[in-house]
Amino acid sequence: MRRDLDDLRRRQADGEFPADLDPACLLLALFAVTSAGVAFPHLVRAICGADPASEEFTEHYAEQIRRLVAHLRR
């Protein structure tokens, strides 16, 4: 985890994301986003009406996260 955090700090210093974001909180948020299907399968079923273990959900969710990041980059 420390290497990942150090990498985010380096990337922040290189201007890849804003200086006012805490790299530690960003790393934690990235873990939360990527583990949503595993951590909250009941929410995936209730909100998305999908099987969180299915390839279809995984691909759809990944695409939506890519789109979210793209919007935030603007």
Image (tube, grey):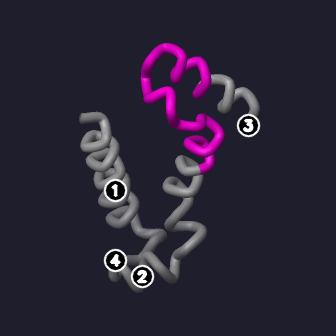
Residue sitting at x 51%, y 82%: 42
Question: Label 3 neighbourhood size at 10 Å, few (<14), some (14-19), many (20+)?
Answer: few
Magenta segment includes 36? no
Instruction: Say if 64 sits above or below 40 in the image.
Output: above
Of labels 3 and 2, earlier in sequence is 3
Q: How far apart are marks 4 and 3 (CA)?
A: 31 Å
Q: Where is residue 72 in the image (x, y as percent from the top left)?
A: 31, 42
Q: Which of 54 and 39 is in front in this view?
A: 39
Query: The residue tagged with tag 3: helix, strand or loop?
Result: loop
Q: Distance between the residues labelled 1 and 2?
A: 15 Å
Q: How far apart are marks 3 and 2 (CA)?
A: 30 Å
| Dot in front, 1 or 2 | 2
- Residue type at mark 1 is Glu
Instruction: Say if 40 sits above or below 58 in the image.
Output: below
| Residue topped by disc 2 | 45
Q: Are marks 4 and 1 in contact (CB under 8 Å)?
A: no
Q: What stretch is highlighted in magenta?
A: 8-28
| Residue topped by disc 1 | 59
| Residue topped by disc 3 | 1
Left or right: 29 in relation to 68: right
